[in-house]
Image (cartoon, rainbow, N blue to C red):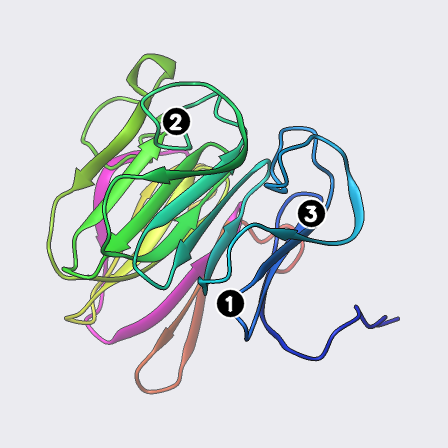
Amino acid sequence: SPTQIPGTTWSKANAGGDYMIATKTDGTLWTWGTNAKGQLGDNSIIKRSSPTQVPGTTWSAVSLASYDFTAAIKTDGTLWLWGDNENGTLGQNSRTYYSSPVQVPGTTWSKLAGNSRTTASIKTDGTLWAWGSNTHGNLGQNQGGGPATYRSSPVQIPGTTWKDISGSYGNFVATKTDGTLWAWGNGGNGQLGQNNKEVNYSSPAQIPGTTWTFATTAENATLAVKTDGTLWSWGKNFYGT
């Protein structure tokens, strides 16, 4: 049953694999749960059963809790990541793990998305950038997937009108300002909306329609809303999703 976490000024929360991240209205950022890869950002690998503050008081409400790494944007538009970095997901041009926030170059970061091995972010100028694993082509670089094609620094996905983005295990879906919807990466269960399955896409592929307003993707399925208020889904349906 619902159990209250202490405090009355919480603003937004996000859930990772086995940990949580949340912001308060005073700009502070808090994490708790598993911490084996330093994903709590408290300069340790000790798991926490109550909220622990990540240093700083200018965190915005834009944050990402992935399986074992974390990302968050500050009010000045800077982007910070910490935790597992095996696939270069922290954007540091290395594979070094960090248990405290490290900055990705730039000051105009706006939106965040990610999956267990890849990070993506939209800037205020509408450009979209990704880094980390490319196993399923989820960096959107029109390259075949595979461990050799990972990127440990941000690489741009073509286009300058990206609006919002969501990521899951090995794929992304993103909307543009013109109402179009795009998907790429792992398409094993038809979650890319291309009328096929067991096909990966290494570049954004458009899903039919021009009135999409919001989309989110899980490991095997995708949900999206149109401007007329209708809700659409596709992908694996084994559990009736």
Q: Position of residue 218 (x, y in %)?
A: 52, 52
Q: Please tell me in which quadrant of the rendered image residue 114 appears.
A: top left
Assess disc 1: are there few (<14), some (14-19) or many (≥20) residues with their C-alpha within 10 Å of its C-alpha. some
* Mark 2 and mark 3 residues within 8 Å of each other at the beta carbon: no
- Residues 88 and 146: in front is 88
160 in relation to 92, above or below? below
Q: Residue at x 82, y 72 (%)?
A: 4
204 in relation to 36, above or below? below
Q: Residue at x 62, y 32 (%)?
A: 38
Per the image, label 2 sits on a secondary structure element best described as loop
Comparing labels 3 and 1, the label whose residue is closer to the camera: 1
Residue range in magenta is 198-220
| Residue annotated with mark 1 | 27
Left or right? Give the position of 210 relative to 84.
Answer: left
Q: Is 215 part of what is drawn in magenta?
A: yes
Q: Quadrant for the N terminus, please.
A: bottom right
Q: Position of residue 220 (x, y in %)?
A: 52, 46
- Looking at the image, is mark 1 or mark 2 earlier in the sequence? 1
Left or right? Give the position of 125 relative to 114.
Answer: left
Q: Residue at x 41, y 35 (%)?
A: 118
Please state which amino acid type lies under the numbered disc 1: Gly
| Residue annotated with mark 3 | 19
- Looking at the image, is mark 2 or mark 3 earlier in the sequence? 3
Comparing labels 1 and 2, the label whose residue is closer to the camera: 1
Q: Position of residue 138 (x, y in %)?
A: 33, 35
Spatial CA span between label 1 and label 2: 31 Å
Please state which amino acid type lies under the numbered disc 2: Ser
**Residue reaching furthest to the top:** 148
Left or right? Give the position of 195 relative to 159.
Answer: right
| Residue annotated with mark 2 | 133
